[in-house]
Image: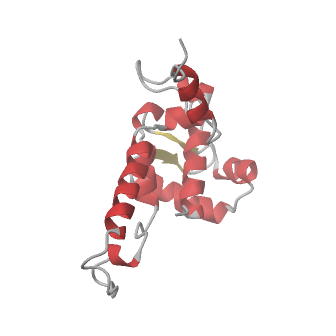
Amino acid sequence: MRLAEYTDYTLRVLMYCATHRDELVTIGTLAEHHGLSKNHLMKIVNDLARQGVLETTRGRGGGLRLLKDPASIRIGDVVRASETDFRLVECFDPQTNVCTLSASCRLKRLFGSALQAYFKELDGATLADIAGPAAASRAAPGARRTIPLSPAAGPARRAARQPRRGAA
């Protein structure tokens, strides 16, 4: 499964805004910082404003900023709102499913469980978790503060906390 570029850029916009909460951010600044098209970013910003995540101000001296605390914005919700298709296999869509194995196939259940686990992990993370120190310092008390940046960092950290088998 691969996220659409639209979702990737949406997350980048939110992360930038979360780390620059004390200022109005412009589309031009975002475009230059991320090397993206202003027109593409305008669509994303308009969608986020419609969802009530961003506040936008037009005109000279205008810009955009987060309306919500980064600790209250779940990454799973952002991904759900940005993506258009979570059909991992054909049989996820009953209207277009022509698979002859559907009646006895267990693959759909396996992929369905995997998708639920994927969203459970994303729902456990907030914008404050991924935006960096500036947003994390404003996170609500008790909120998760960091997420490992490399896939190996999480399992290695868990392994370091657990006693090794056979060790005294």
Q: How is the image coloured?
A: secondary structure
Q: Position of residue 31 (x, y in %)?
A: 70, 54
Q: Could you say which is closer to the camera, residue 79 or residue 50?
A: 79
Q: Residue visible at 46% across and 53% down?
A: 48
**Viewer-proximal residue among 44 and 12:** 12
- Give the residue drawn at x 41%, y 18%: 141
Left-right relation of 22 to 80: right
Tell me where residue 102 appears, x and y as whole percent.
29, 79
* Residue farthest to the front, as pictured: 166
Q: Can residue 20 be seen from the camera position used here?
A: no
Q: Is residue 92 above or below residue 56?
A: below
Residue found at the far top of this picture: 168
Above or below for 86 versus 130: below
Which quadrant of the structure image shows residue 103?
A: bottom left
- Name the residue: 42% across, 25% down: 143
Asked if residue 22 can be seen in this view, the reply is: yes
Q: How many marks?
A: 0
At which x and y percent is residue 111? Answer: 39, 63
Of the pair 155 and 80, the residue shown nearer to us: 155
Taking the spot 56% from the left edge, 27% from the top edge, the residue there is: 159
Name which quarter of the figure residue 2 lies in.
Answer: bottom right
Q: Position of residue 61 (x, y in %)?
A: 63, 42
